[in-house]
Amino acid sequence: MPSLEEELWVIAKPSGKKAQAAEDDLGSGALMAKLPDQVKQIPLPLKHTAVTATIDGYIASVEVIQKFNNPYDSKIEAVYMFPLPQNSAVNEFIMVIGDRRIRGIIRDRKEAETIYADAKRQGYTASLLTQERPNIFTQKVANIEPGKNIDIHIKYFNTLSYRDGWYEFVFPMVVGPRFNPPGSTDGIGAVARGRHGTSGQKNEVQYLKPTERSGHDIALNVNLNTGVAIEEITSTNHKITEAGDQIGLRKIAIAKNDRIPNKDFVLRYRVAGKRIKSNLLTHKNKNGQYFTMMLYPPADLKSLERQPVELIFVLDCSGSMRGQPFNQAKAAIRKGLGRLNPQDTFQIIRFSNNASQLGPRPLKATEENIQRGLNYLSQLNSGGGTMMIEGIKAALDFAHDENHLRFVCFLTDGYIGNDAQILGEVHKRISNSRIFSFGVGSAPNRYLMNRMAKLGRGAVGYLSLKDDGAKVMDKFFDSISHPALTDIKINWGAMKVKDVYPARIPDLFVGRPVILTGRFEGKMPAEIRVNGMTGGEAAQVLIKATTPESGAGHEGIPSVWARMKIADLADRSTYTPNMELPDQIKEIALNYNLMSVFTAFVAVDSSQRTKGKIGTTVSQAIPVPEGVKYSTTVNE
């Protein structure tokens, strides 16, 4: 129930005949402003975003505050498309107007959109949060009066990734421009500021020119609570400040001179100890018992030699990769070719508007063939669209050599609008291949990268503008050079687990654990046994377990579990025609108060109508991601 300071206001749908708009109801229009070429500051409604993240174990609790202001002389509706982590469980939404806090309610998306539209038409201040992709959301705030401020509070939970000894917290700040295949209309268009409706796509992002600035900045603070000494902290893309001298506690903030939201915030930290053991977190509430477990492969895998590999490099040569991202991806492939052994095989595939490759089949990794590969790579240039589906088909349709473990390495920014189609093709063609996806650039499509790796039973890595492509590829080889733990089976003892996600446990690679989340009805055993095969030999991981007490554990675990269940159902919908899946997703989202593509948050302040007769819709234009060329990605 809302607290005394929080009130919930809902506009009832008019019954019977459609109600006529009053004289002072909200109209519609387009904001037109001619600005001199020398003017760089563009007045837009989103002034500031404040982010506060608290990390406990490997679960983050994050609050995002979007501060809107109307800089014009008439009412506006602000529209802002923005990213959140692909695994974020958004479960709280509050609109703040002065000292009033209006708590949003979760509803069926169509119902929420109707409530919002009615409130907008009648002149009430309202806000609507919808999901366009698992990592892309749209915020709408209607009837902001001239000079008035409105804050939107969003809260979510998500799990951190862990690889090669480092935990990683990511907060994406900008939606990269997407390429949509010809004939598609359900994608996300990339258009210039003020060019609404010119892309032919259902959703659009407006981008500022390189000479323009909106004034929107971001402040981000992270409260780290690791419980053990922190050995090292790095920020991949931003300058940061650190405070705190207690063991396991640290406060990190983005530096004041690095607050333009044009790249992902990536915080990596390493804690004391040679190796982090497998972790199990639990939570118990009135709805039952939940757990999340980070599963690590055995440390002694490093003593075993790797089997021969078949390495397929798939390079994105589209226009959005032009410049530094493309050069870094090529450097990574050059390093990968240099790490191959004579018993290995390889292939290089490029894609942009179409796909082509070095040869009709994988080549033996002889010195002569590797030089052929290097020569082919040096001749590749970037330009054109991102027909990634052609690269998928070319990479996964090779006949598989059973004597080689096949790894398909995609190096791309993932700037496409047909994510679901790509994932469907991966599932259809994956067979015995493993996918390692490398997200390239300052703000890659992390949702697509992560889901491809999940469907491909592989892993994901990221290559930012400040990373060394050769070193990233070296870490990849360090992982695959040791046998994966395959055919994993878990003995849960008396836990009586159910609904564990991912439903199919991926393979484990050295330094790259897997997170499993589920529910259980039984008792917690003293230990959980994880069995698998590596290099033809049996291996086992033992995980210590403790019984959760009522109310104990991390409150975000039920939301994290529900989000993973929704993600699993959404994945199935890309390759399994099933009319029941949308209803199942919606039911889970409503029961756990979560955002999904079929649900939305809506908040309405019906205490008073706003003044004025005309309301103009203003889309919040954003900068293109750092390192991405405006001229090659934005539709003018």
Image (cartoon, rainbow, N blue to C red):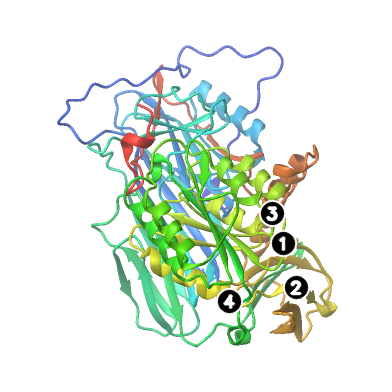
Q: Which residue in the structure is indicated by mark 4?
A: 510
Residue at point 47% right, 26% down? 609
Q: Looking at the picture, how far across and down is residue 455, in whole percent?
A: 66, 55
Mark nearer the N terminus (1 vs 4): 1
User: Tag 1's secondary structure?
Assistant: strand
Q: Which residue is mark 3?
A: 399
Residue at image x 69%, y 68%? 403
Residue underneath mark 1: 501
The tag on residue 488 is: 2
Name the amino acid type tagged 3.
Answer: Ala
Residue 311 vertical placement versus 513 (above, below):
above
Whether residues under marks 4 and 3 lie with C-beta atoms below 8 angstroms apart, the answer is no
Q: Position of residue 414 (x, y in %)?
A: 49, 47
Residue sticking out furthest to the front: 368
Which residue type carries mark 2?
A: Ile
In the rendered image, is residue 620 in sight? no
